[in-house]
Image: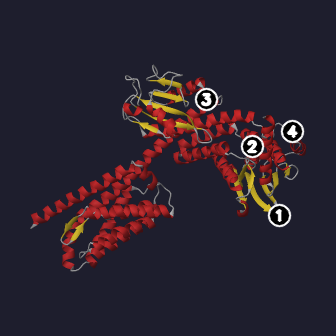
Amino acid sequence: MTNGFGFLHLKLYLSLIEGLSVIIAIAFILAQTPIARFLFNFERSFKKQILLGVFFGLVSIAGTYLGEPVGGAIANIRDIGAITGGLFGGPVVGLIAGLIGGLHRYTLGGFTALPCTIATITNGFVAGLLYKKREEDIFNPFRAMVFAIAAESFHMFLVLVLAKPYTRAVTLVNIISGPMIISNAIGVWMFLFVVKATYREREFITALTAEKVLKIAEETLPILSKGLNMETAKNTVEIILKNTNLDAVGITDREKILAFSGAGEDHHKVGDEFHTKATKEAIKSGRTIVMYTPDDIGCNVSKCPLSSGIVVPMRSADGDVFGVLKLYRVRPYAVSLLDMRIAKGLADILSTQIQLNRIEKEKRLRMVSQIRALQARINPHFLFNALNTIRYMVRKDPNEGYDLLLKLSFILRETLERKTNFVTVREEVDLVKAYLSIEKVRFGDRLETQFEVDDAVQNENIPTLILQPLVENAIKHGFSPDKKKLLIDIKVYKRLNMLYMVVSDDGRGIGADKLKEILSFKDNHSIGLRNVHDRLKNLYGDKFYLKITSKIHKGTKVVIGIPTEGVKEWLLGQLSLTTRNQQEKK
């Protein structure tokens, strides 16, 4: 009898460990997919909690099916899904996962159906309550294992209390308690460990990617400010190779190779048409092409040493592909996740820098003063300061560094891609907030900001880049040696038919003589404010309102008022004027 009992114990251990291996293998494979990037992040919207609950509920169901029938019951690893879901996602996720796994178990019947159902639901919900007690981004796997031991012990207790007949329940618990407690506890530990390891790997890749991209961007910024040609492309390719371990790098326009350096440069020559089908496909489709083998690259030279790589389109402000960035390796299947992120990050940054140059050229050709002033506000000093700030944050906090990088991209995209002279108040305020978020990291607690924007004006049209130069001036000129902090207050509201924008600070202020000089709008040190004034003058004639008041050591206040009616009429008038001028030239 004892030998039979021992054999049954061993069989249960082996069966549950086998099922556990399946679940952990699935978790590991899933952690490498885009699905994991969507599910396993720290966004906790209600929709995301529902999806996570369903996912971990399915894990619970799988744990039931991977169990072993024993005496009218099922020895299982079902609670792994409910407990892990609660610890990772919180009480809503744990409750949903527990309900799905528990109710499914109840439908299977058996004399332990009720206690098993209650245990799974309870364990998932209680695990979710512990979610807020975590000290790290992800609940500590070892502590999770300790909780799982307690949770499974509670599971066995419910079987003893609720399952009938009692003697049968005692016999069952004697057989399954050890295997279930140990396998579920190890399963919870391993599941969270896999998720945590995946996060750490992504944080490392994100930090390394951002640092490399920012370093390359900083070195290429003065080069690509001259535009994209064979000389600037050659210098850019050399910088990328110097800062990475890639085997070859190339840049093309839509027709020919502008620069190529590294393996295969003997036949990938500057000025030639592309040799690879992947390049042609990327330009034609506008898609990023990842190449794992020489066949994927499709070079028409048989002895080409390139075996894998990635081709990323570079786009203009209107979304058209004007060229590609190509990163290569000489070994097949050697393209890593880091390579992919570096390639996409570099392509975005290079596209932006090239766009800056193109817009600068267009600016000199355009007669509309508002477009000219818009491009003039892309401040290279801000770019350098922002890049240095982000580089520092990447080392200190990779996630925040990556978030700041996205905000910088947003700022550049918004200033480059706007097609008209007007935006909504909401869009302008979003741009200012993104700008301030980067400046906030630079100045820390020394800079405070507050916004008061009436809901009624959110969709009102205003000239683009009206608020941002005023906020930039407040930061640039507001700080003083005798004040540790600077408060900037931004207000937007409507009175009658006028929309008012107010930017005030409590900084060092402006002297009366200097203020008089600024208000003449001839001061070369107030380019931003003069551009704002000139654009308002061109747009509204004498119908706009601009007032600046300031006191030394007390702060400065700038108030702009513009009419909320007549904007459409002005745009139609400008269009009519442009059409008439074109006809006269013909």
> Residue 259 at x, y = what percent?
53, 25
Q: Residue at x 60, y 33 (%)?
A: 218
Disc 2 packing (10 Å; few <14; some 14–19; many ≥20): few
For label 4, the SS is loop
On residue 496, the disc is 1
User: Which amino acid does the dot numbered 3 rest on?
Assistant: Leu
User: Which amino acid does the dot numbered 4 rest on?
Assistant: Lys
* Badge 1 or badge 4: first in the primary sequence: 1
Assign the C terminus to one quadrant of the image.
top right
On residue 476, the disc is 2
How far apart are the two marked residues, 1 and 3, measured between alpha carbons? 50 Å
Q: Are marks 1 and 3 in contact (CB under 8 Å)?
A: no
Would residue 378 be seen by someone viewing this image from the given angle?
yes
For label 1, the SS is loop
User: Which amino acid does the dot numbered 2 rest on?
Assistant: Lys
Report the residue marked by disc 4.
522
Report the residue marked by disc 3.
228
Q: Looking at this rendering, what residue extends furthest in the bottom direction?
A: 165
* Badge 3 or badge 2: first in the primary sequence: 3
> Residue 73 at x, y = what percent?
22, 71
User: Which residue is nearer to you in this view: 415 or 111?
Assistant: 415
| Closer to viewer: mark 1 or mark 4 | 1
How far apart are the two marked residues, 3 and 4, measured between alpha carbons? 35 Å
Q: Are marks 1 and 2 in contact (CB under 8 Å)?
A: no
For label 2, the SS is helix
| Closer to viewer: mark 2 or mark 4 | 4
* Badge 1 or badge 3: first in the primary sequence: 3
Assign the N terminus to one quadrant of the image.
bottom left
Q: Residue at x 50, y 25 (%)?
A: 273
Q: How is the image coloured?
A: secondary structure
> Residue 424 at x, y = what percent?
70, 54
